[in-house]
Amino acid sequence: MMGRRHIIMVILVSSLTVLVHPLSPDGQALLEFKSAIKASDGVLASWDKNDEEPCSWSGVTCNWHTKRVIAVNLPFRKLSGYMTRSLGNLTELRRLALHHNSLVGSIPSELGNCRRLKALYLEVNYLSGHIPMEIGRLSRLMMLDLSSNSLSGSIPATLGNLNRLTLFNVSTNFLTGEIPEGGALSKFSSNSFLGNLKLCGLQVNAICLSQLEGPSATPDSFTTPLIGLGSAPPIGVLKKPHRYSTQVLVSALGTVGVSLLVALMCFWGCFLYHKFWKKSKTHKFKKIEIPSEPGVVLFHGDLPYTSKEIERKLETLEENNIIGYGGFGTVYKLIMDDGKAFAVKKIEKWNTGSDRFFEGELKILGTIKHRNLVNLRGYCNGPFARLLIYDYLQGGSLDEVLHEHNPSNLSWAARLKIALGAAQGLAYLHHDCSPRVVHRDIKSSNILLDTNFEPHVSDFGLAKLLEDNETHVTTVIAGTFGYLAPEYLHNGRATEKADVYSYGVVLLELLSGKRPTDSSFVEKGLNIVGWVNTLMKEKKLDDIIDPSCDDATVESLEAVLNIATMCIRSIPDERPTMNMVVKLLKSQSMSPCSSDFYESELE
């Protein structure tokens, strides 16, 4: 009798074992995170503990072969709570996007265990505490945005090890001390550090006096402007240290006198020596290697060079040929013997996509020719990097001309020419190419100009080349913050209408002369779209327009502003197509039109 009962119990237990599927470890880690979220817009309702794995949960993307979580996308979801240490158990994670929420508490150091992480977006929350030094372990990290939080302490020196970083932003926090010298952070401008009143270093035009006062000084002591740079330090740089009174500070400065000036000059000389001259002596530049087969592949037969001639020139590229660092890698200027110049993009090889897929897509892109698109002339699939060869444009990028040079040189007529040309190039990609091409990264730095301000859209199709072919989710390149459409931030799905939104942001740049994430937007919308919407509601249209546009008529400015506001509508279906944008801009350039005309054209 006991034996029969035992057999029945075994059968029942076995049946239950078959019926109950324990949630995977990745799912358990996410459920622990869910338990720390006190409120949201309901996005976490689908996160069910009875599921076998979390791949069908909202905001979660898995590798469909391994069922491991590779992306968590939950921006703009009204999340209120904190980040749990269990997120560090998602060891296959490539992308963690929790920006524009109401998260509090500290950033868990356990994120350093997510060694495959390529994009970490935590901006616009209420996170506090220090930046974990463990983030410096994430050697594959390319996008790191911690801006607009309440982070304090110094920037960990370990972040300088993140050599693949193409986006870095810690602006608008309460960070202190010196920005780590050398390493990956040295290539980022002041925009990555603005709004931290006690930061010091070359990027923010301030030296930490603690470096001059000896080892007893604290790292967050007061700062002074760099000598000889010709610009004033950021507001608040000369604030007194919190440990000392004003009287002591004045006394100390009076005692030092001329000696301090001499010490500063000596320090600045040593700083330049160690940072530039000495570094240039010890740094070994890695030469570009060209494989014997297939070597350089050229697309157009109108070049007066052979593949071998271009290969020989590519092998001579040196560090002083670098002209920029983009979202896709390093950019070189290649000059042939007859003076003809090309731009060469060097993309480090990642474990994403096969070479056959990469080359097949490139051959399609190589057939695309339009007066407002940058010609892709050829490529080379080397052992350690992929090289893309483009026509070189002497006018630089719209970003440089509009924000780094004198914007008064860019007349309203030139801005209209750029707006129309860029729209025509993008419309060709959307409507005339087969298959159609979604750009995914429209921004002012991807609109290149010739000497006559004729625009040429660059980098089209490259985001698709670098996506994860197993999941069809772009984990390497995710666009540029400030230009991304709300729905793209929400679901990561790139469409033509997301390109239209990004183009609308470029139009707002041309109108206002401001960057998409200008620091002046803090009080009115956080970015250029929110800022413009706020000013339009307040009927302060004059505050939007760049003073350099004094040669424009009011009707022309209002017409272009109307087009821009259509492009940045929050609902994708309400945005015009790029063909329609071209039609509207052409009509506007011929004669000013009322807003009623634009609205009727969309119906």
Image (cartoon, grey):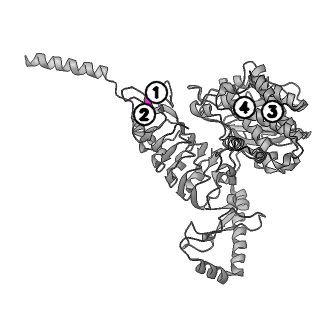
Question: Mark 2, mark 4: which one is toward the viewer?
Answer: 4
Q: CA distance from mark 4 to mark 3?
A: 14 Å
- Label 4 CA crowd tier, 10 Å (few <14, some 14–19, many 20+): many
Mark 2 closeness class: few <14, some 14–19, many ≥20 residues within 10 Å: many
Residue 216's disc is: none
Is there a contact, CB below 8 Å, between mark 2 and mark 1? yes
| Element marked by disc 2 | helix
- First reached walking from the N terminus: tag 1 or tag 3: 1
State which mark lies toward you, 1 or 3: 3
Residue 507 lies left or right of residue 589; in this view the side is left
Residue type at the position of mark 1: Lys
Q: How many marks?
A: 4
Magenta segment boundaries in residue numbering? 45-56
Cα separation, mark 2 vs mark 3, equals 44 Å
Q: Give the amino acid type for the residue marked by disc 4 in the picture.
A: Cys
- Which residue is under mark 1? 67
Q: Could you give the CA–CA distance between mark 2 and mark 1, rounded to whole angstroms?
A: 9 Å
* Residue 178 on image: x %, y %: 61, 62
Q: Position of residue 82 (x, y in %)?
A: 45, 45
Which secondary structure dominates the residues rendered in magenta?
A: loop
Residue at the spot 52% in from the left edge and 53% down from the top edge: 131
In this rendered view, identify the residue nearer to me: 27 or 394.
27
Residue at the image point whose x is 10% and y is 18% from the top: 3
In what quadrant of the picture does the N terminus appear? Answer: top left
Q: In x, y percent, where is residue 342?
A: 83, 37
Name the N-terminal-most of marks 4 and 3. Answer: 3
Discs 4, 3 touching: Cβ within 8 Å = no
